Amino acid sequence: MQESGATWLEGGCACGEVRYRVAADPILVNNCYCSLCQRQTGSTSVVNLFIEAEKLELLTGETHSHVLKAASGGPHEIVRCVTCGTALWSFYPRLGRLGAGVRVATLDEPARVQPDAAIFTADRMPWVTLPEGVPQFEGAYDPASFLPPDRLARMRALAERKRMAAL
């Protein structure tokens, strides 16, 4: 994908009612194996593509949100198709509604997106094999240890926007 955002990603829900577009390259893509993600997805992990919320466009359909408690104790808002309930993206406490974590499996071409990191691997099921060549973290991690400077700057800019909004 190109940093210019010229290569857009599109996706949607299981029933086809909701369609969305990601209009820029990801800031970060992580594959989270924490027990909370396992419980919330009913799977062994979740792969999230993090993007500035203004780069995520709802094209068709209607969504609704469920707010759960994140591991940090803050609000984790999961946005779902109102018809079929597919989880499409989330807003996490760290960035609030400024940064969205798009569920990679809901993209039309999920294989175009590769994880930057496998996180909370200590919680993974014992039979799950971790991807080779992807940085792995047993628990908390620092994106500055593996993200390229341009993407790290975008993440820091979002964190600063959230900090300024809270003042």
Image (cartoon, rainbow, N blue to C red):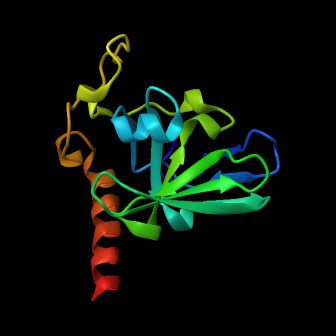
Residue 136, by quadrant, is: top left
| Residue 140 placement, left or right of 155 | left
Q: How many marks?
A: 0
Q: Residue 66's spot in the image, x, y percent?
A: 56, 60
| Residue 126 placement, left or right of 60 | left
Residue at position x 36%, y 65% in the image: 95
Q: Residue 61's spot in the image, x, y percent?
A: 80, 58
| Residue 49 placement, left or right of 28 | right
Residue at position x 35%, y 84% in the image: 165
Residue at position x 40%, y 59% in the image: 92
Check the picture and name the quadrant holding the C terminus.
bottom left
156 w.r.t. 1: above or below: below
Q: Residue 42's spot in the image, x, y percent?
A: 52, 32
Residue at position x 53%, y 48% in the image: 102
Residue 120, by quadrant, is: top left
Q: Residue 166's spot in the image, x, y percent?
A: 31, 84
- Foreground residue among 33 and 130: 33
Q: Is residue 32 visible?
A: yes
| Residue 93 placement, left or right of 83 | left
Residue 72, by quadrant, is: bottom left
25 w.r.t. 109: above or below: below
